[in-house]
Every structure is written in C-alpha cells, then in structure tokens.
Image (spheres, rainbow, N blue to C red):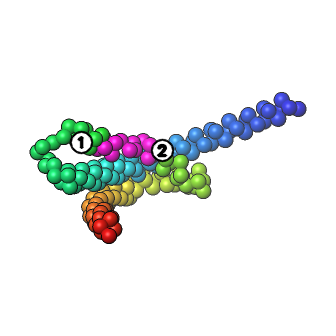
C-alpha cells in the first residue's frame, strides 16, 4: 500500500513538474517575443548611468568641499570612485531580471491564455506593439533618469544645508 502511494505521489510530482516546465517554456517564448530582455537591458543601462552620475557628482562635491581640484587627483579616492562605478554596472544582469519577472508572470493564466498571448506577440500587430513598447520605455527611462537625478541632487543639497544649519545652531 505504501509503495502504491509513493508511486502515485511520484507520478503526480513528475506530472506537475512537466506542466511547470512547459509553462516556463511558454513564458520564456513570450518574454522573447515581447523583447523584454531588451527592455530590461535598457532600464539597467539607464539606472546604471543615473547611479554613476550621482556618485560622480558626490565625489566631485566632496573633493570641492575639501579644496581638492580634479587636476590634483588622488589615486585612492579615484579608485574608490572606480569601484563604485563598477558596482553600479553590475547590480543586476538582464537574465536575472528576466528570470525574476518570469517567476511572477501570470500565475492565474491558463495554458490556453499563454498560447493566445504568445500567438499575439508573434503576429504583426504584436511585434509592432512590442517594438513600440521598447521604444517608449527607452525614452521614458531617459526622461525619468534625468528628472530623478535633478530631484535627487536637490534633495541631497537640501539635506546638506539642513544638516549644516542644524550643526551651526
């Protein structure tokens, strides 16, 4: 009896794994058809550029506050900035984001739903939709990066002023 239950459990487990594997394969095809890997790479590039710009601005401000000109250079400080810039470029990989996104994609979608979605993205209209979305996201990310940097710099500047004012009292 135990053996029969074990066999039934294994069969159901294998069946569930096969279904999940097929589902993940369909989702991978949808991701590819949507061009999400390109969209995620664009977002990573913009986020990295923004983080690098903010870090570089902080570096320059700290040097200026200490009376150090960029021409004087300090290999130790330059190395610290270089390490920061390297970390900014390697926070996430495109594959990591695609895998993460795929794990959240449509838990309530049926196999039939996935087939229809995939058919749409393989159609002419679906290909145009995916391309338009990528182009819009690229421009949107550029605008948001610029605006976020302005707002972050203003916030950092205000924080610095407020702290200096509080310390002066």
The image shows residue 85, relative to residue 161, as above or below, that is above
- Image coordinates of residue 49 in percent, x first then y, are 27, 51
* Furthest residue in direction front, as rendered: 169
Is residue 68 toward the left or the right of residue 153 in the image?
Answer: left
How many labels, in total?
Answer: 2
Packing grade of label 2 (10 A; few <14, some 14-19, many >=20) is some
The answer to whether any part of residue 147 appears in the image is no
Which span of residues is magenta-colored?
84-99
- Where does the image place residue 28, in percent across and percent down from the top left? 48, 44
Quadrant of the image for the N terminus?
top right
Q: Nearer the viewer, mark 1 or mark 2?
A: 1
Q: Position of residue 108 (x, y in %)?
A: 60, 56
On the image, numbered disc 2 is attached to which residue? 99
User: Residue drawn at (33%, 45%), measured in percent from left and top?
Assistant: 88
Residue under the point 13% across and 49% down: 69
**Which residue bears the numbered disc 1?**
77
Left or right of 67 on screen, residue 132: right
Quadrant for the C terminus, please: bottom left
């Amino acid at each position: 009896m135990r053996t029969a239950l074990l066999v039934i459990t294994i069969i159901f487990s294998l069946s569930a794994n096969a279904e999940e594997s097929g589902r993940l394969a369909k989702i991978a095809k949808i991701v590819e058809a949507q061009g999400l890997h390109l969209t995620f790479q664009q977002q990573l590039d913009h986020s990295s550029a923004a983080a690098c710009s903010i870090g570089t601005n902080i570096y320059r401000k700290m040097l200026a506050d200490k009376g150090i000109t960029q021409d004087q250079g300090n290999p130790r400080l330059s190395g610290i900035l270089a390490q920061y810039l390297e970390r900014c470029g390697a926070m996430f990989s495109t594959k990591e984001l695609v895998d993460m996104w795929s794990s959240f994609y449509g838990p309530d979608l049926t196999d039939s739903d996935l087939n229809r979605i995939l058919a749409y993205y393989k159609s002419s209209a679906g290909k145009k939709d995916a391309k338009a979305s990528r182009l819009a996201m690229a421009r949107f990310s550029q605008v948001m990066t610029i605006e976020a940097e302005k707002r972050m710099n203003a916030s950092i500047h205000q924080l610095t002023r407020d702290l200096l004012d509080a310390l002066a009292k």
